[in-house]
Amino acid sequence: MEFITGGVAAAKGFSASGLHCGIRKNKTKKDLALIVSEKEANAAAMFTTNLVQGAPIAVTRDHLAKGSARAIICNSGNANTCNADGVFIAKEMCRLTAEQLGLKTEDVLVASTGVIGQPLSLDPIANALEALKKGLNSQDGSDAAQAIMTTDTVCKQAAVKFFCGGKECVLGGMAKGSGMIHPDLATMLVFLTTDCAVSSQFLNRALHDAVDNSFHMMSIDQDTSTNDTVCILANGLAGNETICREDEDYHAFLSALSAVTDALCRMIAEDGEGATKLLCVKVSGGKTREDARKIAKTVVCSNLLKCAIFGADANWGRVLCAIGYSKACVSIAGVDVAFSSSAGEIKVCEKGAGIPFSEELAKEILSQKEITISITLSDGEANATAYGCDLTYDYVKINGDYRT
Amino acid sequence: MEFITGGVAAAKGFSASGLHCGIRKNKTKKDLALIVSEKEANAAAMFTTNLVQGAPIAVTRDHLAKGSARAIICNSGNANTCNADGVFIAKEMCRLTAEQLGLKTEDVLVASTGVIGQPLSLDPIANALEALKKGLNSQDGSDAAQAIMTTDTVCKQAAVKFFCGGKECVLGGMAKGSGMIHPDLATMLVFLTTDCAVSSQFLNRALHDAVDNSFHMMSIDQDTSTNDTVCILANGLAGNETICREDEDYHAFLSALSAVTDALCRMIAEDGEGATKLLCVKVSGGKTREDARKIAKTVVCSNLLKCAIFGADANWGRVLCAIGYSKACVSIAGVDVAFSSSAGEIKVCEKGAGIPFSEELAKEILSQKEITISITLSDGEANATAYGCDLTYDYVKINGDYRT
């Protein structure tokens, strides 16, 4: 497996484009993205568990019922959520896109991200579709990836080349997400494309497996969004035998998918609103997988710990405190904690109690861009990793006046 | 019922003192508090549900087994938690205090608050006990209330005078708490004293009832502390017939207790770390009490909403979003939301969708010191209120380098 460029346009038969159509006030920010497969693609998706769901989710769910799709239209700047005419608007976005591409309405999936509760006007979208089609690029998904950004500060793309059933396959993806990020589903929008041939059923299964260990283990601010969508299209143009059982090919595909979701996951956590540091919490020795996951997620979510990491303060008491309220089954007297980064590793807590350590070295370790907190339990064999970021002045600033 | 001064020293037969003994580096900050009842008092307490519990909690639980106590010793600046010798130190604090006051070790309860995982030295405490006893004041609990403060910016005391069984009774209390505040138990330390005669059993029951609607409904930062303790002593010196059934007297007592816990609860929320605003979330029309409580607590905990309140941004979509992930049983299409404060009230969402409103008026309403978010559901008759505060730059600043 090898990382390559191209994002959602990297795989055979996929093209993508993005432009500014006028939903966002700032004309330098793209706000409309299109992804097209030249051949019908098997499709699978996962959505937010929030009871409040964006109108596009209802329409995409409906269009996905047949297990395939040809295109995805997505806007930023407005979530099309909690609007009386939301479903009509989302359907119209699909219909107009289909018309432009010569497809059926049900072949198009739709997603929106941005402010909740403000009516979304169709006009700027309708007027931009011709240009959007013209801009389709089969080498580079960057324009599309830029067009789905909201408070993101970096454009998030990843792609890999891998072998499956003797054929060279490609899987690529793009993501947006910076705030309102918490399992489940811990992301805003992720679109994945592959030329590998996979049945709808196994595409769905691989997506759940990959998401469970990546986006479901990430939190920026404990707020689960209303519009979260992770969607994958597989058009089969690589020519491999279609994956439809749990064999070697399936595992090769799952590895490629996991590599891309992990990479996007880290990019999102690193670009968390206001974040200055990527935080990885690794738990080992948990009684069950569920216990290890609960602990990793609870620790990565602690506001107090996140502030301490921002301040490079080795306040391990906050790690213990969070483990204590995680509701996991855990023996506190058997907990070890260490901090590490590119500057080294330092053990700060052994068997649930503090041990002497160099504050100087701890400070240096915690001053790096990527911090790992290793929690070793004495309860069993289960492991889990969670991703997050520090809590900073800028998170407050960004969210103090988001709508204006 | 009438609010009066005096805090924990307001009730007959109680005295309190506080001083700087040297646990905290800053000599202007008191760090040791003592509360004494001149007569044996019935006692009840509630503790953090965190699996990591401070050593003082183990000792206090033990001493409370007999349902009565005479004194409480409490330090700030060090939580005596996650230390190998913690229980020994906590017991010694009780023994030395008892010795000074001529009591038995088991008559003394102990609490600590501050940094986790740093050894607590007995010497400064032992050396200060004589002065602490000399300073006992039977009129004013301020010194004691100051001595339990950590990042608190205001000293928190409340007391009421009420009638029970034809006798005038007094109930007073003090609290500390600013960060690491989340149900259950949503506070750090609360000590309550009353001269009302109440059996241990009904004292315990009233405490649970009052806490359930106050400290259990408050969150500053979703971090449940390791040392939370709410403790009440009732010495019976008011001379009323001992309350030992659910009669009129019990309800008079419960009202007085609730008035004091509510007042302390609002003081804590208002003084949340870095907070500039008190946030009350009132839910009505919930299907069950539990649903209403879940929604109120989830909304008051949303980091995104808390940032919006800091910025006086009427981003009601974040209220809907939090309701949606609260896991309560709720019909989103029946949700109304209004913001209010001393500057007026404004409805911003009706039947789950946005309605036009004056941004100017909304801004003015949200610029006041005390904000209420009213959420009206269409699911039933249940109500709940939760307390919290905004999330600000200063929260991050305070917690970025807490230990130094």
Image: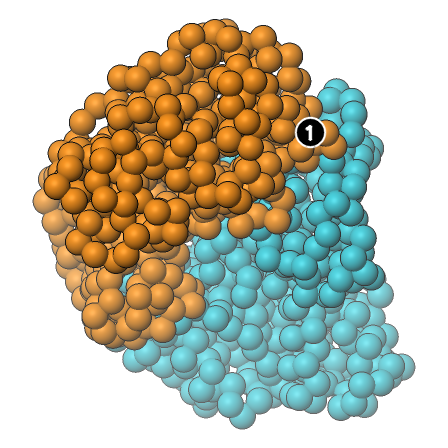
Chain colours: A cyan, B orange
Q: Residue at x 34, y 43 (%)?
A: B388
A40 sits left or right of A399 in the view: right
B340 sits left or right of B86 in the view: left
Disc 1 designates what residue? B88
Q: Residue at x 19, y 49 (%)?
A: B249
Snapshot quadrant of residue B360: top left
Residue B376 visible within the image: yes
Residue B267 % position (x, y): 30, 33
Q: Residue at x 57, y 48 (%)?
A: B50
Give SS at disc 1. helix
Residue B219 % position (x, y): 40, 45
Instruction: Identify whether B110 is placed above or below B212.
Output: above
Task: Between residue B199 and residue A257, name the one nearer to us.
Answer: B199
Instruction: Identify whether B164 is placed above or below B2.
Output: below
Instruction: Identify whether B123 is placed above or below B149.
Output: above
Residue B353 visible within the image: no
Residue A349 % position (x, y): 76, 36
Task: Between residue A231 and residue B374, name the one nearer to us.
Answer: B374
